[in-house]
Image (tube, coloured by chain):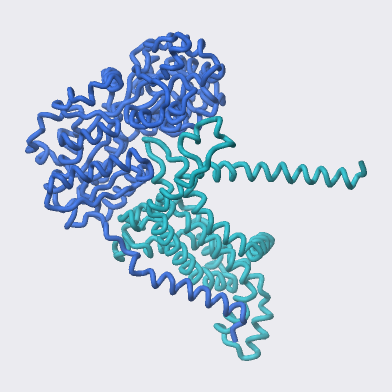
């Protein structure tokens, strides 16, 4: 005989199994990867964030307005998992029809055979001449993706604080340094992001001192680290900035009480909504060399396993290359790439004007001449940047260690 | 002040300090879930703020109930699969000796160290062959597969601790092997089984990587994906993130509350065997 106690456990397990069985009808999804009756679009626009939720809705509305034959199935995938999911799906010759990714994983996706060459579709696109070459993602002369909008970073400033202290927006690192000295610890001087294994925030500063991944120079890196390390030491940058992501640094900026922050144009919508002070933007100041910025902008790709290349390209063209699609991006804070939208009313905004200025020193996120090793090269630089911000490493040690690691990867 | 009174004061102060260390992050989590986004970064609103349930309302309207049901299906299925396989296997491993068993145990130790990311492509391929991608049970099978080595290693000492003499006595009374296993061994090892069940359920409840990789419909996503939905390069919805965290932690807290005795007993027993 089964003991009453064990009997009770068995009953509970049986009840749980019954519950699961009852729910069985809802265990298979309707979305599927690459369902032939619809256009499946994988994106990382988080639905818990109002700005991205609205952008996704606007993209969907733009697609619906175009009255294309197949309905759009928009599927959220967290940004960090998207490439992994595409590659895993490619292993089973499946995938979405269209997806976006940040740009860092382009070569990995090509290598995995996960993305389609859509040169023929793009060449036949009626508005092809409106899309600048810089926004067409090519490899060996083949079109593997497009960018429907430009994103980059610059130096945001709190004009209310600067006016109060009689500080002009800086154009050189020396001026920025002097401005931070004047602000002292009355306000938080500058918001920098130290978390993460990529150099998104560090790049402008290290390039302003001449650091180049192609010829990594410890002295250049050390000079940049000396500057920001000095700011951290004097309290102009909080030590916990080492744990901030770029969006956290920017959210702290928009909360007020911070004079400067490095942030993207895509944050403009958030700034408009939350900042209760006057703000402005200037390109990240130059030092011994021009401060370079990464030219971001979501890369839109077609899966190698789409069953309908025409429908997939129509979706890309409608959502990301059409006027309506690019204006939706503009409303979210991103800058359209279409030449005929360069003078559109929204782009007359002085904030965008400054970001466009910053883009004159823009470089693609996947730096020309580099392959998948670039991600591994950025990691030690980002770690060194973080260690300097946290005060865990001297600028010299951090620079030497990072450059040695970069050189090892390069070999 | 007498010695005993001084000791009591020190004990109370120590407890208060410990409580503060543990309670402060929980307070911060709970308080943030009731703040507006503006209050999250306003230093003046660190302690005093006007509470709002808006984050909970938004999270609920954002499909929390569906995600929670998906998580329940995944977690319960995973637990059932793990128990059905791990319990008899561990019993077998406890009762057998020899090079094959030793090799098997070494293999289990190695297998539990395989990083989940390296299993994504082979598991995806396997689940696709079985027609189980885009299926909650497929995710449960994948999680169970990675949980099994640890579960078996945890359970084996419990079965090994059951004296063979008890089984031999039952056998002499005419009990079959199955009867001895079900009526004698399982009741004695219930703490260990409850421990494995609890740890498996909690692990599967919060699982993220497999769910995101093997599911293709946001309507199937578990609660862990809802957490990710609160973060993007545009910003972090801190109140939403904390509200989901609070709601997601409720089942885990309930399990600990109701299963504390079995769980603590199970973990400590396993640790000294």
The answer to whether residue A152 is left or right of residue B97 is left
Q: Relative to A161, does residue B164 appear above or below in the rendering?
A: below
Name chain B's colour: cyan
Q: What residue is at 47 percent from the left and 54 percent from the top?
A: B206
Total labels: the figure holds: 0
Q: Quadrant of the C terminus of chain B?
A: bottom right
Residue A161 pos. (x, y %): 46, 16
Q: Relative to A154, does residue B250 appear above or below in the rendering?
A: below
Indicate the chain coloured blue by its letter: A
Q: Quadrant of residue B98?
A: bottom right
Q: What residue is at 43 percent from the left and 50 percent from the top?
A: B57
The answer to whether residue B183 is left or right of residue B165 is left
Query: Which residue is nearer to you in this view: B141 or B45?
Result: B45
Q: Relative to A339, does residue A47 appear above or below in the rendering?
A: below
Residue B29 pos. (x, y %): 54, 44
Q: What residue occupies the far front of the structure in this picture?
A: B50
The answer to whether residue B2 is left or right of residue A371 is right
Q: Relative to A146, does residue A225 appear above or below in the rendering?
A: above
Residue B75 pos. (x, y %): 46, 62
Residue A131 pos. (x, y %): 15, 30
Q: What residue is at 25 percent from the left and 37 percent from the top?
A: A299
Q: Quadrant of the N terminus of chain B?
A: top right
Q: What residue is at 53 percent from the left and 74 percent from the top?
A: A12
Judge whether residue B98 can be spotted in this image.
Answer: yes
Query: Which residue is nearer to you in this view: B231 or B128?
Result: B231
Judge whether residue A411 can be spotted in this image.
Answer: no
């Amino acid at each position: 005989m089964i003991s009453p106690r064990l009997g009770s456990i068995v009953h509970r397990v049986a009840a749980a199994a019954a519950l699961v069985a009852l729910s069985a009808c809802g265990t298979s999804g309707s979305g599927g990867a690459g369902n032939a009756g619809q256009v499946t679009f994988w994106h990382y626009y988080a639905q818990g964030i109002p700005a991205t939720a609205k952008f996704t809705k606007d993209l969907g509305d733009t697609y619906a307005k175009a009255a294309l034959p197949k309905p759009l199935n928009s599927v959220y995938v967290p940004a960090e998992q998207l490439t992994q999911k595409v590659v895993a799906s490619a292993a089973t010759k499946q995938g979405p029809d269209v997806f976006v990714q940040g740009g860092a994983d382009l070569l990995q996706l090509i290598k995995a055979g996960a993305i389609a060459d859509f040169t023929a579709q793009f060449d036949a696109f009626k508005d092809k001449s409106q899309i600048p070459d810089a926004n067409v993602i090519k490899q060996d002369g083949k079109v593997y993706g497009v960018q429907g909008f430009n994103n980059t970073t610059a130096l945001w400033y709190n004009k209310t604080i600067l006016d109060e202290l009689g500080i002009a927006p800086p154009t050189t690192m020396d001026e920025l340094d002097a401005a931070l000295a004047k602000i002292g610890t009355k306000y938080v001087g500058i918001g920098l992001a130290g978390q993460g294994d990529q150099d998104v925030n560090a790049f402008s500063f290290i390039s302003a001192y001449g650091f180049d991944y192609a010829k990594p120079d410890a002295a250049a890196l050390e000079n940049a680290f000396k500057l920001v390390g000095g700011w951290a030491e004097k309290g102009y940058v909080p030590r916990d900035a080492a744990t901030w992501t770029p969006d956290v640094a920017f959210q702290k900026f928009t909360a007020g009480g911070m004079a400067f922050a490095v942030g993207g144009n895509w944050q403009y919508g958030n700034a408009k909504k939350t900042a209760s002070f006057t703000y402005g933007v200037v390109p990240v100041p130059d030092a011994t060399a021009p401060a370079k910025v990464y030219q971001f902008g979501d890369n839109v790709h077609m899966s190698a396993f789409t069953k309908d290349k025409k429908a997939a390209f129509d979706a890309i063209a409608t959502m990301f290359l059409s006027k309506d699609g690019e204006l939706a991006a503009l409303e979210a804070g991103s800058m359209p790439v279409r030449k005929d939208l360069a003078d559109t009313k929204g782009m007359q905004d002085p904030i965008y004007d400054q970001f466009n200025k910053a883009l004159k020193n823009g470089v693609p996120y996947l730096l020309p001449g580099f392959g998948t090793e670039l991600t591994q090269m950025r990691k030690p630089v980002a770690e060194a940047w973080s260690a300097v911000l946290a005060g865990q490493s001297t600028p010299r040690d951090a620079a030497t260690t990072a450059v040695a690691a970069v050189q090892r990867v390069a070999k | 002040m007498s010695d005993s009174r001084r000791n009591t004061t020190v004990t109370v102060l120590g407890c208060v300090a410990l409580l503060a260390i543990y309670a402060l992050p929980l307070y911060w989590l709970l308080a943030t879930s009731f703040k507006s986004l503006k209050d999250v970064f306003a230093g003046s609103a660190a302690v005093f703020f006007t509470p709002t349930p808006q984050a909970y309302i938004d999270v609920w309207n954002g499909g929390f109930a569906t995600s929670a049901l998906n998580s329940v299906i995944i977690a319960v299925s995973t637990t059932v699969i793990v128990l059905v396989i791990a319990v008899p296997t561990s019993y077998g491993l406890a009762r057998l000796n020899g090079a094959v068993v030793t090799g098997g145990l070494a293999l289990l130790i190695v297998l539990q160290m395989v990083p989940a990311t390296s299993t994504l492509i082979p598991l995806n391929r396997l689940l696709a062959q079985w027609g189980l991608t885009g299926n909650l049970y497929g995710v449960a099978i994948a999680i169970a597969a990675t949980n099994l080595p640890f579960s078996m290693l945890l359970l084996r000492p419990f079965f090994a601790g059951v004296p063979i003499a008890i089984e031999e006595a039952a056998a002499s009374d005419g009990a079959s092997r199955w009867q001895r296993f079900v009526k004698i061994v399982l009741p004695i090892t219930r703490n260990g089984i409850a421990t494995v069940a609890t740890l498996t359920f909690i692990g599967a409840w919060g699982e993220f990587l497999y769910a995101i990789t093997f599911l293709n419909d946001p309507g199937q996503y578990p609660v862990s994906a809802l957490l990710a939905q609160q973060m993007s390069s545009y910003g972090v919805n801190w109140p939403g993130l904390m509200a989901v965290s609070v709601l997601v932690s409720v089942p885990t807290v309930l399990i600990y509350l109701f299963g504390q005795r079995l769980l603590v007993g199970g973990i400590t027993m396993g640790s000294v065997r």
